[in-house]
Amino acid sequence: MQKSKIDDLKFYDLRHTFGSQLAFGLAHPKMIQRIMGHKSIAMTMRYVNLADEELERAANILEDRMSGNATSRLLHVSTKEG
């Protein structure tokens, strides 16, 4: 950690950032729960701390959907049908 000049970094810090970034990408909490391996949604919600800007972005996405506009602000997940 000397090169990064970050003192007192713990694995938990990285895990929390990972969960929060998934939430910022508007991943569904149940999806985050499965990815992180939590047994309860309550544990997942400890990691899902959304900033006001993210809540506003989610509201804008809903508004876009309701008005029929493109939803380019969504987290894009491609799927393949086999």
Image (cartoon, grey):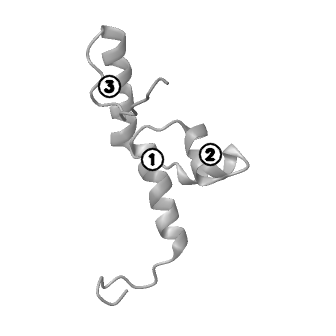
Q: Position of residue 50 (x, y in %)?
A: 44, 45
Q: Where is 35 relative to 28, above or below?
A: below
Three-letter code, disc 2: Arg
Residue at which label 3 appears: 60
Disc 3 packing (10 Å; few <14; some 14–19; many ≥20): some
Q: What residue do we see at 29% from left, 31% from top? A: 73
In the displayed structure, 74 sits above or below 34; it is above
Describe the element under mark 3 as helix, strand or loop.
Answer: helix
Label 2 SS: helix
- Residue 22's label in the rendered image is 1
Kindly identify the residue that appears in the image at 55 percent across and 45 percent down: 32
Q: From mark 3 to mark 1, how far is it between C-alphas?
A: 18 Å
Q: Which residue position is annotated with label 2?
A: 34
Q: Give coordinates of residue 75: x percent, y percent.
A: 37, 35
* Quarter-of-image position of residue 71: top left
Which badge, 3 or 1, is on the more N-terminal residue? 1
| Disc 2 and disc 1 in contact, CB within 8 angstroms | no
- N-terminal of the pair, mark 3 or mark 2, is 2
* Kind of residue at badge 1: Leu
Q: In the image, which is nearer the foreground, mark 3 or mark 2?
A: 2
Q: Residues within 10 Å of mark 2 (few under 14, many from 20)?
A: few
Front: mark 3 or 1: 1
Q: Is residue 70 above or below residue 58?
A: above
Please report whichever mark, 2 or 1, sits nearer to the chain's N-terminal start.
Answer: 1
* Quadrant in the picture for residue 67: top left
Question: Mark 3 and mark 2: span between their CA atoms?
Answer: 27 Å
* Amino acid at pointer 3: Asn
**Mark 3 in CB contact with mark 1 (< 8 angstroms):** no
